[in-house]
Image (cartoon, rainbow, N blue to C red):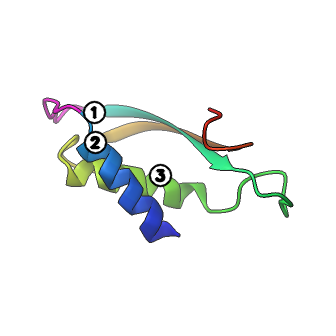
Amino acid sequence: RYAKFREAMTQWVTEQPPVNISENPLAVYVEFAVNKPKNPANSYPTGDIDNYVKAVLDSLQSRMFLKDDKQVEYLEATKRYVDNENTL
């Protein structure tokens, strides 16, 4: 599943307009909306949020939206269930 997520993230990044790369410190805010299964085992999405974040930062770095993910000084990330992919 990670490979599929990473591929989708890379595709999304490539569709974004170009930006000027900064070498300044960055703050990153990420929200993961995960499709809710019919019978979830937990009240929260499975998958480690740090792996989700890593995929995002690696994708942004690979497409040169940031020079290096060590520029990130502040990180806020959440994950939550949604009823379907159209609900955000």
Q: Residue at x 20, y 49 (%)?
A: 63
For marks 3 and 2, give the CA distance: 14 Å
Residue 31 position within the rendered picture, expressed as x and y whole percent measured from the top left:
56, 38
Relative to 63, say whether 88 is above or below: above
- Identify the residue under disc 2: 71
Q: How many neighbours does mark 3 have within 10 angstroms: few (below 14), some (14-19), or many (20 or more)?
A: many
- Real-space CA distance between mark 1 and mark 2, rounded to the nearest whole angstrom: 5 Å
When the figure is inspected, residue 59 is found, relative to residue 87, above or below; the finding is: below
**Magenta part of the chain:** 17-24
Q: Amino acid at mark 1?
A: Pro
Q: Amino acid at mark 3?
A: Val
Q: Name the residue: 34% across, 45% down.
A: 12
User: N-terminal of the two: label 1 or label 3?
Assistant: 1
Q: First in sequence: mark 3 or mark 2?
A: 3
Element on which disc 2 rests:
helix
**Left or right of 3 on screen, residue 81:** right
Question: In the image, which is nearer the foreground, mark 1 or mark 3?
Answer: 3
Task: Indicate which disc, 1 or 2, sits on the residue closer to the N terminus.
Answer: 1
Secondary structure of the residue carrying tag 1 is loop
The amino acid type found where label 2 is placed reads Gln
Q: What residue do we see at 37% from left, 61% from top?
A: 7
The kind of secondary structure the magenta stretch mainly shows is loop
Whether residues under marks 3 and 2 lie with C-beta atoms below 8 angstroms apart, the answer is no
Describe residue 73's horizontal placement relative to residue 35 as left or right.
left
Where does residue 18 sit, x and y in percent of width and height? 16, 33
Per the image, the residue denoted by label 3 is 53
Residue indicated by mark 1: 25
